[in-house]
Amino acid sequence: MPHPTAAPPPGTPFVALAAVAKSFGAVRALRGVDLDVRSGECLGLAGHNGAGKSTLMQVLVGNVSPDEGRFTVQGEDVAGRLTVARARQAGIACVFQELSLCPNLSVLENARIRHASLKGFGWRGRAARLITRTLDEIFPGHGIAPQALVSDLPLGQRQMVEIASVFAQGDHEAPLRLVILDEPTSSLDNSVAAQLLAHVRRFVSAGGSVILISHILGEILSTCDRIAVMSDGRVVDLREAGAFTRASLVEAMGHVVSHEAGETLVSAEAGRRGAVVASATTPKGGSIRLEARRGEIVGLAGLAGHGQTSLLVLLHNAAQGRSRYAAVTGRVAFVAGDRQTDGVFPLWSIGGNVTVRSLSRLGRFGLVDPAREKRLAEEWRTRIKIRTPDMDDNILTLSGGNQQKALFARALGSDAEVILMDDPMRGVDIGTKQEVYALVRAEADKGRTFIWYTTEFDELKSCDHTYVFRSGRIVAELGRHELTEARVLQSSFEGEAA
């Protein structure tokens, strides 16, 4: 296992930041942050999307230079800023929310990019052994070949490769001291996420430090030693993890404590009464056919990478008349979970990303009416609370969660009758989730149909009906009142309903 060597005594501040500030034009991302990260601890970092968490991490790894503030690393003052080279020399590494892998390269070639010591004759073999050994240690049973092309891997496995490449310790490299994990489980199912969090505790027990950023509050509460809460560019609360409850953590983040998703979204209708608007079987066969009815929220469950996303793609193709396995009645919109690859148009504005699905409705005399387009963008900026001073700014100026809000706005603001959602809450904060849950339920009550793949069990409780996948097939069909985590897990591993 990669672990810090000659680590400072537990509890010693490894990195300390004082009055760190950063602005991007008119946007003040950090407003005087004071924070320390200690050896032998996992520090949780919570806060709403746009609170400044990711910017602070970019400062820590040297990618962003702060406007003001001071740093110490292992007690040594760093004048002005941390550079990338200084951060690496100090043993600081980060798994970013938006993955940094090169999709056109293999798993082992990506490991070579991160680890400069993998060079010279036989480097491919050494890289394959290093990444495979680390994957085996963190994610037993991962099934990832080192020669596999990254673009061929599902999103969850890509995230596993990114995590393993950061934790891997090559020969003649500076010992790994601090690992920053920015939404590391956002594309992992519960069992794989548990493997990672267990590894985090092992790393910390060996004297290392971890900063864990997650919108899955249970992970932070169960894994971290201390929790810092950020809001609007400041640390507004910092306590031992045991001093927080879920409710007090949500409150510290500035959100009103609300019901769980399943309680918020319970449908008033007790049966499957609407007309079928989408149906599908998987290409691998199986006796269970998915059916989604008008006004329903239908969940797709099971371990990540077992065919849920492929079925959503089948349904999307069926709406264009291009699938023999699925049928869809009505117009379709797709909310991608892998927003960087399948979601945002990175050269476009925020408003352009929101309105692109609706351009045919915004025309006048064969041309897009800019005034109508702007009104639609501003309407959804307000309705879904996209945190930006200007919808004409580039989409990449937004935090990851706010980019996801823009994708929701694109789908919900369109004329689509069936909305396909591919784990859309990845990297979204609890307050935004509650707002989106309410929007989804309200739109379903108006007759829209949602087909929703999620890796979070609590979100399945939002659904009127759930289908569980295993090895590319639907293996169980559960009504809302039949749904339990035990039944989903048993179906996921055994291939049949409990």
Image (cartoon, rainbow, N blue to C red):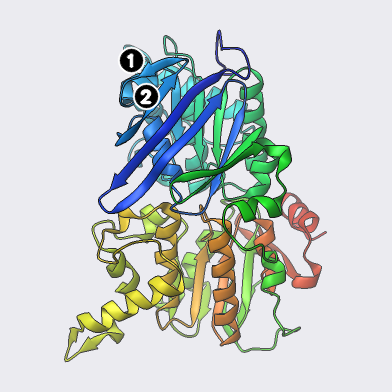
Counting from the top left corner in percent of width and height, residue 75 is at 46, 15
Residue 444 seen by the camera? yes
Q: Disc 2 vs disc 1: Cβ atoms closer than 8 Å?
A: yes
Counting from the top left corner in percent of width and height, residue 204 is at 62, 24
Residue nearest the viewer, comparing 223 with 431: 431
Quarter that holds the C terminus: bottom right
Q: In this view, does 406 lie to the left or right of 155?
A: left
Mark 2 or mark 1: which comes first in sequence?
Answer: 2
Counting from the top left corner in percent of width and height, residue 88 is at 38, 21
Residue nearest the viewer, comparing 57 with 396: 57
At horizontal 34% and vertical 27% (from top left) the residue drawn is 113
Residue 112: mark: 2
Alpha-carbon span between mark 2 and mark 1: 8 Å
Mark 1 element type: loop
At horizontal 57% and vertical 12% (from top left) the residue drawn is 8
The crowd level at tag 2 (other Cα within 10 Å; few <14, some 14-19, many 20+) is many
In this figure, what is the number of numbered marks?
A: 2
Mark 2 element type: helix
Residue 119: mark: 1
Residue 149 seen by the camera? no
Q: Which amino acid does label 1 sit on?
A: Lys
